[in-house]
Image: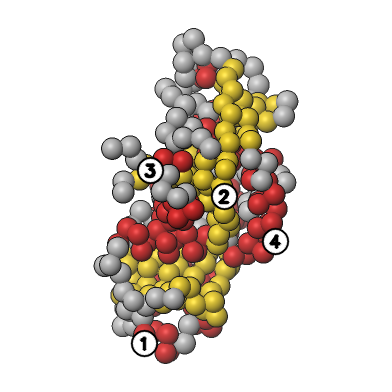
């Protein structure tokens, strides 16, 4: 089965005044009403916002969660049939605290999304979309990554392997056997935000950053440079130093304490996934540590993998009605939505 996946930056900002003709389409011109306020979401907030933001690992009761959830539904409302079968995921660090709350949120069943199409359509204006959710489930994010990996690789994955997800808010890992995730090996810790926060502190000692927030710094570190006072500042050295520190002080100790020599002996590979794989310095840290132990391999579609896994989980619940299925990953860096691709 082919999958269509949409990625939206997980940021938003209040929107005031005229918003006409700011984008070429819905995904780049998303403007959503939440209660009595309008918000630019995703790419529109990234391009036009002054301080686009979101709360990291937001609770379902917070507006961040609902705005991004509505943006996810809006992005695919023309590609799936209502009522929907939906799967969402949560990192281990918040799963026990938020699972019931997310389920109560989804149990509303009916969601009305009010949006402004004038940002991209000449004759656009305020419109409403009504979405019904018939079935839903909430699963751990790492499980979503594992399901996605197995579905994509089919029978071409090892029997036993280690999966590590390098997300913005959290990094997680665990050993996978034919029976599933080995709970005693599972861990959850600080994600790439640790790197972004320390990079911001270090750069602030040398440069006036003009109130750049963590999402601006994240984009700059990904590119390897940023402009400060009209000067191009090379960030590659700072990035390598702080990522190496992050790996040595956060990731590596947890791997050592959660996996035994017997685990390494029975596994064939370490798969790494999540947005962190796009930092080559971080991938190099894994390769350097495990060069003589296990092969380190980048998972396919690393930033989309959890969402693809959520979609396949939704399909298990759908009684064969795949056209109704959606997998939603409300990530701290990106919101990723997967639906079956029409033939």
In percent of width and height, residue 323 lies at 41, 40
Viewer-nearest of discs 4 and 1: 4
Write the residue at 49% across / 10% down: 123
Secondary element under disc 3, as helix, strand or loop, is strand
Q: Say the numbered circle drawn on residue 136.
A: 2
Q: Residue furthest front?
A: 319
Q: Which numbered disc flags the more N-terminal residue, 3 or 2? A: 2
N-terminal-most mark, 3 or 4: 4
Q: Secondary structure at mark 2?
A: strand
Q: Residues within 10 Å of mark 2 (few under 14, many from 20)?
A: many
Upstream in the sequence, badge 4 or badge 1? 4
Q: CA distance from mark 3 to mark 4?
A: 31 Å
Marks 1 and 3, how far apart at CA: 38 Å
Apparent side of residue 210 relative to residue 325 in the rendered image (left or right): right
Q: What distance separates the C-alpha of mark 4 from that of mark 2?
A: 18 Å
Task: For marks 3 and 2, give the CA distance.
Answer: 16 Å
Which residue matches tag 1? 265
Q: Earlier in the sequence, mark 4 or mark 2?
A: 4
- How many numbered circles are shown? 4
What mark, if any, has residue 340 been given in the picture?
3
Where does the image place residue 228, in percent across and percent down from the top left? 51, 40
Examine the image and state in which quarter residue 133 appears: top right
Q: Are marks 3 and 2 in contact (CB under 8 Å)?
A: no
Among the two numbered marks 2 and 1 on one chain, the one whose residue lies closer to the N terminus: 2
- Neighbour class for label 1 at 10 Å: few (<14), some, many (≥20)? few
The answer to whether any part of residue 74 appears in the image is yes
- First reached walking from the N terminus: tag 1 or tag 3: 1
| Residue 97: mark in rendering | 4
């Amino acid at each position: 089965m082919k999958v269509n996946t949409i990625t939206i930056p997980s940021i938003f900002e209040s929107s005031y005044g005229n918003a006409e003709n700011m984008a070429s389409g819905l995904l780049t011109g998303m403007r959503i009403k939440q209660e009595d306020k309008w918000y630019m979401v995703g790419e529109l907030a990234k391009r036009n916002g002054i301080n686009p933001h979101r709360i990291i690992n937001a609770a379902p009761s917070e507006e961040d969660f609902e705005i991004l959830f509505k943006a996810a539904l809006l992005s695919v409302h023309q590609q799936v049939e209502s009522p929907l079968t939906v799967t969402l995921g949560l990192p281990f660090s918040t799963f026990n605290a938020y699972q019931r709350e997310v389920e109560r949120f989804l149990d509303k069943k009916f969601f009305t999304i009010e949006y402004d199409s004038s940002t991209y359509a000449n004759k656009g204006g305020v419109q409403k979309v009504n979405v019904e959710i018939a079935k839903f489930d909430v699963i751990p994010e790492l499980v979503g990554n594992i399901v996605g990996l197995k579905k994509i690789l089919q029978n071409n994955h090892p029997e036993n392997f280690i999966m590590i997800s390098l997300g913005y808010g959290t990094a997680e890992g665990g050993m996978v056997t034919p029976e599933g995730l080995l709970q005693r090996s599972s861990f959850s810790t600080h994600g790439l935000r640790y790197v972004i926060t320390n990079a911001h502190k270090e750069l602030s000692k040398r440069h006036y950053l003009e109130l750049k927030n963590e999402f601006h710094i994240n984009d700059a570190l990904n590119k390897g440079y940023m402009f400060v006072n009209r000067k191009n500042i090379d960030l590659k050295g700072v990035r390598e130093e702080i990522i190496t520190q992050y790996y040595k002080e956060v990731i590596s100790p947890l791997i050592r304490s959660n996996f035994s020599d017997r685990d390494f002996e029975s596994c064939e590979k370490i798969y790494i996934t999540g947005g962190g794989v796009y930092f080559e310095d971080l991938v190099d840290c894994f390769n350097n540590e495990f060069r003589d132990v296990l092969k380190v391999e980048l998972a396919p579609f690393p930033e989309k993998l959890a969402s693809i896994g959520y979609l396949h989980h939704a399909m298990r619940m759908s009684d064969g009605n795949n056209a109704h299925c959606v997998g939603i990953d409300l990530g701290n860096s990106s919101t990723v939505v997967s639906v079956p691709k029409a033939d």
